[in-house]
Amino acid sequence: MGVIGVLRGAESVTPYHTRNRFAAKPPHRLERGDVECVGPSIGDVHQVSNVYDDRVSISIHCYGADIGNVRRHVYDAVTGAVKEFVSGYTNA
């Protein structure tokens, strides 16, 4: 389970449902101060992008697990391939 909150700017979120194959639902916009929950039981496959071309948007993501050690998935909308990964950590 996770919570996403927009601190600055705005983001466009395209959720996907996973019955049989991934299919995009209509995108929606999260504005500054908006909060959204994600998780396996309520939908956690999504694509997020900044709505602005000329400024930065900042969102804060809080997860109920050690996200660097959680098995997650990447979905390629063109090929339909799903790939599992564990992100680990980078300290640069």
Image: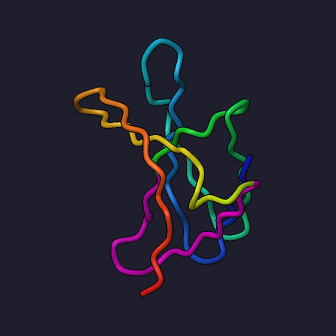
Q: Quadrant of residue 71?
A: top right
Residue that lies at the very extreme toward the left in this rendered image: 79
Query: Where the C terminus falls, by quadrant?
Result: bottom left
- Residue 73 left/right relative to 3: left
Residue at 41% x, 81% y is 55
Q: Is residue 4 magenta?
A: no
Image spot of residue 79 (x, y percent): 23, 29
Q: Residue furthest top?
A: 20
Left or right position of 56 against 28: left
Relative height, residue 74 to residue 34 (above, below):
above
Q: Along the line of sight, which residue is nearer the eye, 2 or 54? A: 2
Question: Which portion, as a residue range, is magenta?
Answer: 48-64
Q: Residue at x 43, y 39 (%)?
A: 84
Residue 49 shown in magenta: yes
**Colour logic:** rainbow
Tell me: 9 left or right of 21: right
**Residue at position x 50%, y 32% from top?**
16
Image x and y of residue 62, in percent: 71, 63
How many numbered circles are shown?
0
Asked if residue 77 lies left or right of residue 73, the reply is left
Give residue 47's position: percent from left, percent from top.
46, 47
User: Residue 82 sits in which quadrant?
Assistant: top left
Residue under the image location 73 percent in, 30 percent down: 41
* Front-lying residue, 73 or 61: 73
Establish if 81 lies above or below 63.
above
Residue at the farthest bottom position: 92
